[in-house]
Amino acid sequence: MIEIRGLTVAFGAVVAVDALDAVLDAPVCGLIGPNGAGKTTLVNLLSGFVRAKAGSVALHGAPLLPMSCAQRVRFGLRRSFQTEQVVDDLSAWDNVHAMLDHVPHSRAEAATQVHAALAHAGLLGVAAVPGAALDLFRRRMVEVAKALVGRPKLVLFDEPGAGLDENESRVLREAIVSIPERFGAQVLLIDHDVDLIAAICTQTLVLDFGRRLALGPTRAVLDDPDVRRAYLGT
Ligand SMILES: Nc1ncnc2c1ncn2[C@@H]1O[C@H](COP(=O)(O)OP(=O)(O)OP(=O)(O)O)[C@@H](O)[C@H]1O
Ligand SMILES: [Mg+2]
């Protein structure tokens, strides 16, 4: 569960997140809003890449903002980036294994976890293939697998489906929606594809100019007249 209280993030005069209050408690939550609404800023704030000007965030009751990036990873926070970060000259296995450098684990546990993460992402067949030889889809799935090792508590996905075709998106969607049950982590998903959000997120937060425009069950949020006007252009 993510509890956000009075959160403000500013870049000089630009207030990217503005006095935001939100409690996200669904296993898979959506985060949507127009370009520049503050979605990536919120993910950067949660993962420790930007600082808050005011407010607090608790993850499962633990105050998140006093923790360093490294402490957040050890605590169980994971994220993917809008552009994927797969290392070209490491195999898919080693790309995923490298994540464990940042969390305490036993050697036996490591192999089991990397295996489970690659299996979940459908990558066991290419475990030995170097990052450079993987296509865009498989590189994106490596990003997913990386988020699943080391006992994650919260996984943040920033547009993980960008550039994928319909079939690939469906595989990605199935991999994401089953993360809470298989790995015990909550998922927060940013995507511009409202159909994807509607299909897999039970709860959705809509930002507009850094403010909370709506929060609730996804269907109700997408039917909200304010959301339709501001975001869906109707
Ligand atoms: N490092 C930064 N320095 C200055 N302004 C920034 C910085 N990062 C974001 N902003 C500004 O903060 C606001 C929110 O940007 P953000 O990237 O969080 O939006 P977003 O909802 O992720 O948009 P998109 O859908 O285009 O990815 C925008 O006005 C943006 O220009
Ligand atoms: Mg963004």
Image: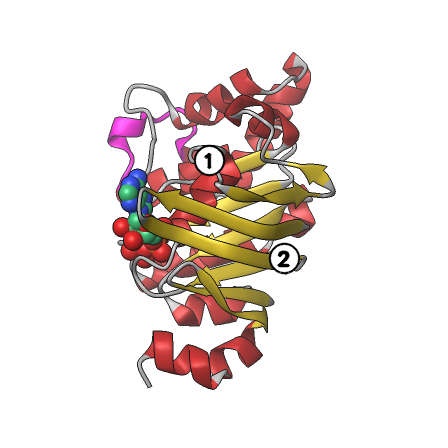
Q: Is the residue 41 above or below the residue 169 in the image?
A: above
Q: Foreground: 108 or 225? A: 225
Which mark identifies residue 18? Answer: none
Residue 164 visible from this viewpoint: no
Task: Look at the image and say whether residue 31 sits in the magenta stretch.
Answer: no
Identified at 43% across, 77% down, the residue is 227
Identified at 59% across, 24% down, the residue is 71
> Which percent across, then down, holds residue 212?
50, 65
Callout 2: SS: strand
Identified at 56% across, 80% down, the residue is 220
Query: How many marks do you count on the picture?
Result: 2
Q: Foreground: 209 or 100? A: 209
Callout 1: SS: loop
The residue that disc 2 covers is 24
Residue most extreme to the right: 61
Q: Is the residue 180 above or below the residue 197 in the image?
A: above
For this view, does 46 lie left or right of residue 194?
right
Q: Magenta stretch? A: 126-135
For this view, does 54 lie left or right of residue 109?
left
Q: In the image, what residue type sits under mark 2? A: Leu
Q: In the image, what residue type sits under mark 1? A: Arg
Task: Look at the image and say whether residue 128 sits in the magenta stretch.
Answer: yes
Q: How is the image coloured?
A: secondary structure
Which mark identifies residue 51? Answer: 1
Label 2, label 1: how far apart the Cα atoms are: 20 Å
Q: Is the residue 203 above or below the residue 55 in the image?
A: below
Q: Residues within 10 Å of mark 2 (few under 14, many from 20)?
A: many
Q: Residues within 10 Å of mark 1 (few under 14, many from 20)?
A: some
Sequence-earlier tag: 2 or 1: 2
> Which percent across, then down, holds residue 24?
63, 57
